[in-house]
């Protein structure tokens, strides 16, 4: 019935076959970047390529390879700014509410949908007002078509960040009006018509392959084919880089610290941006924290430098406010410093003793380490801190009045927000109308609200700089914030390529060059 | 045999229903609003409302459950919340990679583990048997994620002998086979030990049977006695073990899949848990659980077919 034949000779033969297979495998044929192919890392599958309904990240990276944009990010010295893409002859901010543009001629949509025209820009931008990304286009009134390839973006209010936060980022991909409407006005993975140096093909869970677009008439990209390998885990991506299977990948803070000490051969680091700001917040309405002297004592009691070293291995920039490095309004100094003696004196003046506070944080390695350092710092000045680690679901609900009553019990918490490359975005969460939404510190200041409106209307960079610095000063004076750090988006790449990444960390693959 | 089969089928169905119930309950037991968890804290109210309607989250929980069961019974496990793709298709696309990995891992484990077990059993308590025992226990004790990491560090990064990540070039069988070696090694290593220990124990028992002693008395060659007579009986518990191993590894291969960034159901579940894509998590778990049950059932039926004593005991 059951015939089982296993001989020693057979076993040896099998073992030999496996051994031979291993030996033949010794040739690194899979290794990256043979010829004109570039391997990079994507951190997940693309899900929705419709700019109105996408998640972002890899979807923006894909759009930038296959769809037209008016402008793209660049840097000027240490500051992020924008420049027209190959699709645009000119993009000019005429006044506070008008942005004139002119497209270059000759760029054709795939599948025979004709040339890229100003009417496509109008269609793509105006449809955004009714999509999931409508908030980004809130300031858009309409797009005026003035010629087949020219037009004007008209804003409904002076809104100086519009080019940076709307046009230079993912949601401003231009779509073919005819093709998109033919597809029903909405799409997921199959873009109805593309126009870019590459065509794309996704193999779910494995890779997105960018191949040359035979109809492309613009400048040829440096790499004929780009394999974007889907590697979800950042640690796996780092190992893939070290194994030579990808030439460029984002890396984590601990690896950045390791590479700063010992860089892999022929490799370089690039910090794309530091558009995240982390702080320890205090609920100014909580009975235990209503005295501003107590809150300011806590500001003096926390040793932020220890957090940066102990929790982040010295890889993150020290924060002095919510405006991130590279942006107008970035502060270079806080109004307080680590001084436990002063903290003790202020606590004594406030008549505080035997104080016990809860510190809530997301249950992530770095945050927990930071929380424990804060716990030790505050313990040293006589404040007992209970660290409460939380999962993301309840954490993000806890300060919102619409999600229950936890906001009443909030005392201290570690928070990190991400932002766009313009200071307006970070400042919006702390207006009076955000109390119980995202302003969990629950303070109001009429001057702050006024400056917020002035900041978005102002186009003079120097005036904006002063405005945003003053807004952060107001925040700091509430005593409700201990600024901690700005985590970087760091990439490692081989030195034989030059990479182009947005401050928010998206790779612009057509702009990758050979070094 | 038919009665036994029906009985086992009924039990399997009950397990599937229990799994669906637990899976469904978990989504509602997670603290926080399911829509906010899935879409992120800054999702607009319109997006949250649209998501809630699409996922029937605005219906009573019991209604949601019946909708899910009704759809699942017809093979419709819903759609991916982000891309709108069919969950069934997403899971089935990834399942092949996991099945291949598990087959490769278990194949080499069987090819090495069974002869090792036999070898130990026919030379009990010799230094070679003890060494085999230590090696077997050692391979069982080392977690597969550790094996994966070390294999990757040594063979892919330090020596550059084998590829580190992925499943290889689509359509290039040789490349795909090369990409399979390290994950299959990591997945199968522990099973070499399991199988060797299991076969050794079974063989020792069988080798003391009177018909084996009779075979020796008749002067039959040892190889014939061991492989033709003893192993045929001793292999029975191993079939169940391999069946369970195959089923367990369908989701247990997750470490190897994540570490080697290899597509597969385990990695799919991991990724979708991280992105809070609950319909895909539910669908993937349901499909792998069903497969687990089917394979365990097949293994049990196979053993019952081979050994009448088993079916009589139920």
Image: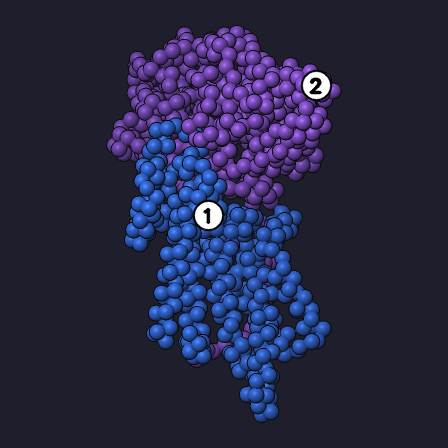
Chain colours: A purple, B blue
Q: Is residue A276 visible?
A: yes
Question: Which image quadrant is residue A369 in?
Answer: top right
Foreground: disc 1 or disc 2: 2
Query: Which residue is at 60% across, 58% downward?
Result: A23
Q: Nearer the viewer, residue B9 or B143?
A: B9
Query: Which residue is at 64% across, 74% downward?
Result: B120
Q: Residue B76 in the image: state x and y as whole percent.
A: 31, 49
Where disc 2 sits, the SS reads helix
Q: Nearer the viewer, residue B239 or B286?
A: B286
Q: Nearer the viewer, residue A153 or A285?
A: A285
Query: In the image, are marks 1 and 2 on the same chain?
Result: no
Q: CA distance from mark 1 to mark 2?
A: 54 Å
Q: Is residue A334 visible?
A: no
Residue B307 shows which numbered tag?
Answer: none
Disc 1: which residue:
B269
Q: Residue A314 in the image: state x and y as whole percent.
A: 67, 30
Q: Please, is residue A228 above or below residue A432 in the view?
A: below
Q: Residue B206 in the image: state x and y as whole percent.
A: 56, 81
Disc 2: which residue:
A348
Question: Which image quadrant is residue A47 in?
Answer: top left
């Amino acid at each position: 019935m059951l015939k089982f034949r296993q001989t020693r000779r057979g076993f040896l033969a099998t073992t030999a076959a496996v051994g031979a297979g291993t030996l033949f495998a010794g040739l690194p044929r899979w290794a990256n970047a043979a010829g004109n192919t570039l391997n990079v890392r994507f951190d997940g599958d693309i899900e929705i390529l419709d700019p109105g309904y996408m998640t972002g990240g890899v979807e923006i990276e894909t759009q930038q390879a296959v769809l037209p944009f008016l402008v793209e990010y660049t840097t000027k010295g240490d500051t992020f700014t924008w420049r027209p893409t190959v699709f645009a002859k000119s993009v000019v901010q005429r006044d506070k509410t008008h942005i004139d543009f002119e497209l270059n001629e000759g760029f054709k949509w795939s599948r025979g949908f004709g040339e890229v025209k100003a009417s496509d820009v109008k269609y793509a931008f105006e449809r955004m007002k009714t999509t999931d990304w409508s908030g980004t286009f809130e300031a858009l009134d309409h797009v005026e078509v003035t010629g087949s390839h020219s037009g004007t973006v008209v804003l409904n209010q002076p809104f100086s960040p519009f080019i940076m936060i709307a046009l230079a980022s993912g949601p401003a991909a231009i779509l073919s009006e005819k093709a998109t409407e033919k597809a029903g006005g909405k799409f997921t993975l199959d873009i109805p018509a593309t126009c870019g140096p590459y065509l794309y093909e996704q193999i779910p869970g494995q890779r997105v392959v960018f191949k040359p677009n035979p109809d492309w008439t613009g400048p040829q990209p440096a790499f004929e084919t780009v394999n974007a390998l889907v590697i979800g885990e950042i640690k796996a991506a780092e190992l893939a880089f070290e194994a030579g299977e990808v030439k460029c990948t984002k890396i984590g803070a601990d690896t950045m610290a390791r590479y700063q000490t010992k860089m892999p051969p022929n490799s370089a680091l690039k910090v794309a941006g530091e558009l995240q700001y982390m702080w320890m917040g205090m609920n100014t309405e909580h009975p235990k924290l209503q005295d501003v002297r107590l809150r300011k004592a806590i500001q003096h009691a926390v040793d932020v430098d220890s957090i940066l070293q102990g929790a982040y291995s010295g890889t993150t920039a020290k924060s002095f406010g919510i405006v991130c490095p590279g942006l107008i309004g970035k502060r270079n100094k806080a109004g307080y410093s680590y001084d436990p003696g002063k903290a003790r004196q202020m606590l004594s003046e406030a008549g505080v003793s035997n104080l016990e506070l809860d510190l809530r944080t997301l249950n992530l390695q770095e945050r927990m380490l930071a929380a424990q350092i804060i716990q030790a710092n505050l313990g040293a000045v006589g404040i007992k801190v209970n660290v409460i680690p939380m999962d993301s679901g309840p954490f993000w609900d806890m300060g919102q009045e619409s999600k229950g009553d936890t906001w009443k019990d909030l005392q201290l918490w570690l928070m990190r927000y991400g932002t766009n490359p313009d200071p307006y975005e970070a400042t919006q969460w702390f207006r009076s109308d955000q109390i119980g939404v995202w302003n969990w510190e629950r303070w109001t200041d009429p001057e702050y609200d006024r400056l917020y409106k002035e900041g978005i209307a102002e186009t003079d960079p120097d005036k904006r700089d002063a405005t945003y610095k003053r807004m952060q000063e107001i925040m700091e004076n509430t005593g409700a914030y201990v600024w901690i750090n700005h985590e970087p988006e760091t990439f490692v790449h081989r030195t034989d390529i030059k990479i182009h990444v947005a401050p928010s960390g998206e790779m612009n693959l057509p702009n990758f060059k050979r070094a | 045999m038919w009665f036994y089969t029906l009985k086992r089928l009924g039990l399997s169905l009950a397990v599937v229903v229990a799994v669906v119930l637990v899976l469904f309950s978990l989504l509602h037991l997670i603290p926080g609003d399911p829509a906010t968890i899935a879409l992120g804290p800054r999702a607009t109210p319109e997006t949250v409302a649209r998501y809630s309607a699409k996922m029937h989250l605005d219906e009573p929980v019991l209604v949601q459950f019946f909708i899910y069961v009704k759809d699942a019974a017809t093979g419709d496990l819903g759609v991916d919340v982000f891309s709108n793709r069919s969950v069934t298709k997403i899971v089935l696309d990834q399942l092949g990679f996991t099945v291949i990995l598990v087959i490769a891992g278990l194949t080499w484990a069987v090819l090495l583990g069974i002869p090792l077990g036999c070898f130990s059993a026919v030379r009990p308590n010799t230094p070679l048997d003890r060494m085999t025992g230590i090696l077997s226990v050692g391979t069982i004790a080392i977690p597969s994620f550790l094996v994966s990491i070390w294999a990757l560090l040594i063979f892919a990064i330090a020596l550059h002998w084998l590829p580190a990540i992925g499943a290889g070039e689509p359509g290039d069988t040789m490349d795909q086979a090369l990409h399979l070696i390290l994950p299959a090694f990591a997945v199968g290593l522990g099973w070499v030990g399991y199988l060797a220990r299991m076969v050794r124990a079974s063989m020792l028992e069988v080798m003391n049977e009177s018909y084996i002693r009779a075979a020796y008395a008749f002067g039959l060659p040892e190889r014939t006695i061991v492989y033709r007579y003893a192993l045929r009986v001793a292999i029975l518990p191993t079939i169940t073990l391999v069946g369970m191993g195959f089923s367990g590894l369908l989701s247990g291969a997750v470490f190897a899949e994540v570490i080697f960034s290899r597509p597969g159901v385990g990695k799919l579940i991991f990724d979708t848990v991280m992105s809070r894509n609950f319909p895909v998590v539910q669908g993937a778990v349901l499909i792998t659980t069903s497969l687990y049950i089917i394979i365990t059932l097949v293994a049990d039926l196979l053993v019952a077919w081979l050994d009448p004593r088993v079916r009589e005991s139920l």
